[in-house]
Image (cartoon, coloured by chain):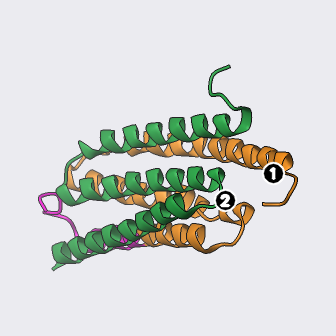
Chain colours: A green, B orange
Amino acid sequence: MTQSLLANALIAAQVMLALAMACAAARLLIGPRAQDRVLGLDTLYVNAMLLILTFGMREGSTLYFELALVIAMLGFVSTAALAKFLLRGEVIE
Amino acid sequence: MSGAEGLPPIAAAVVAVLVVLGAGLALIGSVGLLRLPTFYERIHAPTLGTTMAVALTLIASMLLFSLTQARPVVHELVIAVFVIVTTPVTYMLLLRAAVHRDGLRGGSG
């Protein structure tokens, strides 16, 4: 019974995170200016990291942790590079 | 579903509540990102997801793996520290870029 409670909670969390990713993707597509799209991309990365963590909890495997760490790092680097590009016109000066 | 055997019912309920709260906060932040009218209001909304949702999900993951593997599993703290350090940097850079672009355009965004 407790296993089914935890399993249902994890499925509900995954559905909510998928809806959150859909909202972020909608902002990424319709965002009126470039900074809105960058913000939507950053939110998409964070929600994907949380989704990978809940996948790992469902599977009972700690291997998904490295995936989440890599996604967090890629999200930081890409958002920082895009913001720098919007600020200065080039990424590396 | 191999990870949840031998878990006490109280611990399973606590983990379930933490996971659902974290995912709900991420969903609220993303809905706010979609629905708020201007960029300077929109940039506040995803911080719900990057602070409290990440913290609750990582605490739930640490709790679950520590209880199922009968040893302290704390490597989620690496993600927590990384997110705490990098989120203000990215949002400050993005906000400065937005202010710069609005100054170039001569209007309010």
Q: Is residue A39 magenta?
A: no
Residue displayed at 36% across by 45% down: A68
* Residue A48 picture location, percent across and down: 38, 54
The residue at which mark 1 appears reads as: B102
Residue B31 location (% of width, % of height): 53, 72
Secondary structure of the residue carrying numbered label 2: loop
Q: Chain of mark 1?
A: B
At label 2, which amino acid type do we have? Ile
Q: For this view, does B41 lie left or right of residue A16?
A: right
**Side of B20 where A11 appears, left or right:** left
Q: Which residue is the extreme one toward the bottom?
A: A1
- Point out the frontmost of discs 2 and 1: 1
Where are the magenta residues, as a range? B1-20
Question: Is residue B46 placed above or below B35 in the rendered structure?
Answer: above
Q: Have a look at marks 2 and 1 and say if they share a chain.
A: yes
Mark 2 or mark 1: whose residue is earlier in sequence: 2
Q: Please tell me which residue lies in front, A54 or B62.
A: A54
Q: Can you say whether A76 is above or below A58 in the image?
A: above
> Residue at (32%, 38%) from the top-left corner?
A66
Q: Residue at x 62, y 65 (%)?
A: B45
Assess whether residue B12 is covered by the magenta stretch: yes
Q: Where's residue A90, x and y in %?
A: 65, 28
Residue B102 in percent (x, y) is at: 81, 51
Residue underneath mark 2? B43
